[in-house]
Amino acid sequence: MSKNKDEVLLIVDVQNDFIPGGALAVSGGDEIVPLINRLQEKFDRVIATQDFHPADHGSFAAQHPGKSPGEQIVLEGLPQTLWPVHCVQGSEGAEFHPDLSREKWKAVFQKGKNKLVDSYSGFFDNARRGDTGLGSYLKENGVQKVYVCGLALDYCVKFTALDSNDLGFETFLIQDATRPVNLQPEDGEKAKEELQKAGVKIINSQDI
Ligand code: VGL
Ligand code: ZN
């Protein structure tokens, strides 16, 4: 049984650098790949986002002498967590996990291309100035329900789901098809609480 055309599976940043062995590895990130492949079979429309940074992106600790990944700075007036160099345009780390099925993908929305501002959400940059076009794409295609999965729960998945919800889409987090970075041990749990409070529905892949 295939889901309706007004429902989309949104796969966030399932890229090599977020998989164990990658530059910004998310523990268990590889475990969700087979699950996401099974989920894709249930949807008519599948969309992905791709973290896609220039080599000198301002979110990289290496751009700030004396700073290390995990530290906080202010970048162009916004608080910014510093990260290892990751998902650099043209690098292997920026590519999607090789086992991730891509046959059904209708579009890929790239983000994080402006070196002066990070972009956790697949819709807008963190300053809410740059727009990837994902919101208007979904509206133009009559999408009403957005099912979010991928990496990482406490960053790009969370902010993508929050923006989806803010834009008026009925938004679902598929909790077993995501994993947190957990810079702080409870970040993944906190992200789920925040999403639930905002009105995002937390579900499991077997509910679909
Ligand atoms: C992400 C940190 C930096 C993510 C991307 O995909 O969750 N996290 N860039
Ligand atoms: Zn990034």
Image (tube, rainbow, N blue to C red):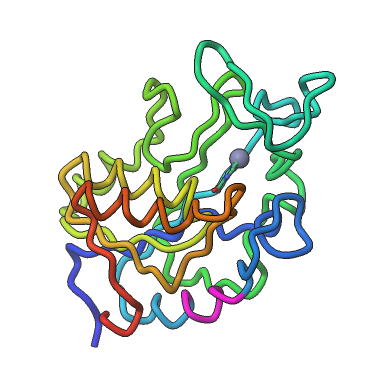
Q: Indicate the quadrant where residue 62 lies.
A: top right
Horizontal side, residue 203 vs residue 157: left or right: left
Q: Which residues are magenta?
A: 31-36
Residue placed at 20% from the left, 40% from the top?
167
Q: Quadrant of ligand 2?
A: top right
Q: Is residue 119 above or below residue 205?
A: above
Taking the view exactly as shown, the residue that stands out farthest to the front is 185
Q: Indicate the quadrant where residue 10 lies.
A: bottom left
Horizontal side, residue 52 vs residue 20: left or right: left
Q: Is residue 160 above or below residue 171?
A: above
* Along the line of sight, the residue nearer the viewer: 64 or 53: 64
Provide residue 101's location: percent of width, then percent of height: 53, 74
Residue placed at 32% from the left, 85% from the top?
206
Taking the view exactly as shown, the residue that stands out farthest to the bottom is 1
* Along the line of sight, the residue nearer the viewer: 147 or 71: 71
Residue placed at 44% from the left, 83% from the top?
38
Q: Is residue 147 above or below residue 54?
A: below
Residue placed at 53% from the left, 22% from the top?
79
Provide residue 174's location: percent of width, then percent of height: 35, 68
Provide residue 193's location: percent of width, then percent of height: 32, 54
* Along the line of sight, the residue nearer the viewer: 190 or 62: 190
